[in-house]
Image: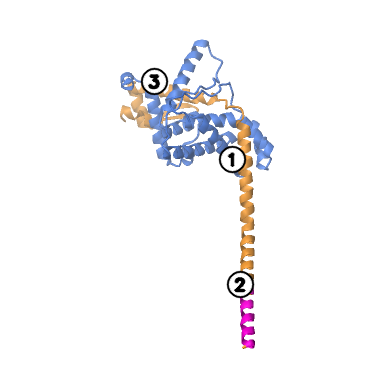
Amino acid sequence: MRCEELAEVVSASDEGVVVDDWRARRHVETCLRCQAELARYRKLVRALRALRADLLQPEAGLVADVMACLEDAGERHALRSLLSEHKVAYVGGLAVATAGAAGAFVIASRTRGRRVALAG
Amino acid sequence: MSDGGNPVPAPEVEPVMPVPADALSPLVAAAREGDRAAFEELVRRTSAETYTLAYRLLGNEEDARDVVQEAYIRAYRGIGKFRGESQFTTWMYRITANCAVTWLDRRRRHHHEELADDAQFADGSADRDPQARADASALRSELNVALQELPPRLRAVVVLRDVYDLPHEAIAAELGISESAAKVRLHRARRRLRERLFPMPGEEKAHAV
């Protein structure tokens, strides 16, 4: 292992920072530079872990905004569901109405044709 | 979003501690049954943590608020499928990370990527001597600034892994990358932070240049 590769073999867990690979561990045991760098990674990871306890306090009103968004999203979702449920009925109704109109037109035109023939 | 010319005021800082996970279990159970009031209480108790993560990933208050809203909408819709294998807060971290990445992609497409202002965080550790507290506080401030100076892709991985302790596979899944890519980004991020905050002899000059 080369000293520059130390970051690639360092892993962190709740137990601390360890060197994963046994070859790398053997190298670190004999390399003062890597030992010093490993100590710095330990400090860094400890500092990063500690950030978890530092919380930003959001501006007042965030919860109300979230709930309002949920309300909006819920209404939009309900409307979409309603529309999709009724879509089939709307399309079916439209088809029936169109077919009815077409049928009426055909009957009317046949009746008119027969009247013309009788008159002739 | 800040325009670079006018500094955005730092978010209000108050000491807040994370909510114990088991305190949320009855609320999660009720919310899964469709109890809206229980879900609202979950939002109330976890919003500071969710918001802090969103802010850390995005570096911007306004974007963080929007992402928090989106994350809770997704959580509300998906809570019926949440089986409680992980803690509710961990589940929220994953959803928030996913929403933040989508947001970052959108922001990048609109060429609005920018460095963040220096937000201040509440100090959650008060039981130390004044000198140690001052040192820790200085380190935290530097670390927060250094995190915000990382490219968003590197920042997301190191924040989710080293601050929030998400496993590599969860990070990879939420960021839409492979596990090995997540690991490579983590190493790069750690190295940059280490060089910036704890330089080895000879690295100080390189950093100063």
Spatial CA distance of label 2 from label 1 is: 48 Å
Q: Mark 3 falls within which chain?
A: B
| Spot occupied by residue A67 in the image (x, y as percentages of width and height) | 63, 36
Q: In which quarter of the image is residue B78?
A: top right
Q: Which of marks 2 and 1 is in front?
A: 2
Per the rendering, the colour in which chain A appears is: orange
Q: Is residue B21 visible?
A: no
Q: Which amino acid does label 1 sit on?
A: Ile
**Do marks 3 and 2 both belong to one polypeptide chain?**
no
- The answer to whether marks 2 and 1 mark residues whose Cβ atoms lie closer than 8 Å is no
Mark 3 residue crowding within 10 angstroms, few (<14) / some (14–19) / many (20+): some
Q: What residue type is labelled 2?
A: Ala
Magenta-span inclusion, residue A110: yes
Question: Looking at the rendered structure, which numbered label has been put on residue A93?
Answer: none
Q: Can residue B142 be seen in this view?
A: yes
Spatial CA distance of label 3 from label 1 is: 40 Å
Q: Going 56% across and 16% down the picture, which residue do you hit?
A: B126
SS majority, magenta:
helix
Q: Which of B164 and A107 is in front in this view?
A: A107
- The answer to whether marks 3 and 1 mark residues whose Cβ atoms lie closer than 8 Å is no
Q: Which amino acid does label 3 sit on?
A: Phe
> Going by the picture, which residue comes out furthest to the front?
A119
| Spot occupied by residue B166 in the image (x, y as percentages of width and height) | 50, 34
Q: Nearer the viewer, residue B100 or A89?
A: A89
Q: Name the residue under label 1.
A: B73
Q: What element carries label 3?
A: loop
Q: In which quarter of the image is residue A36?
A: top left
The mark nearer the N terminus, 3 or 1, is 1
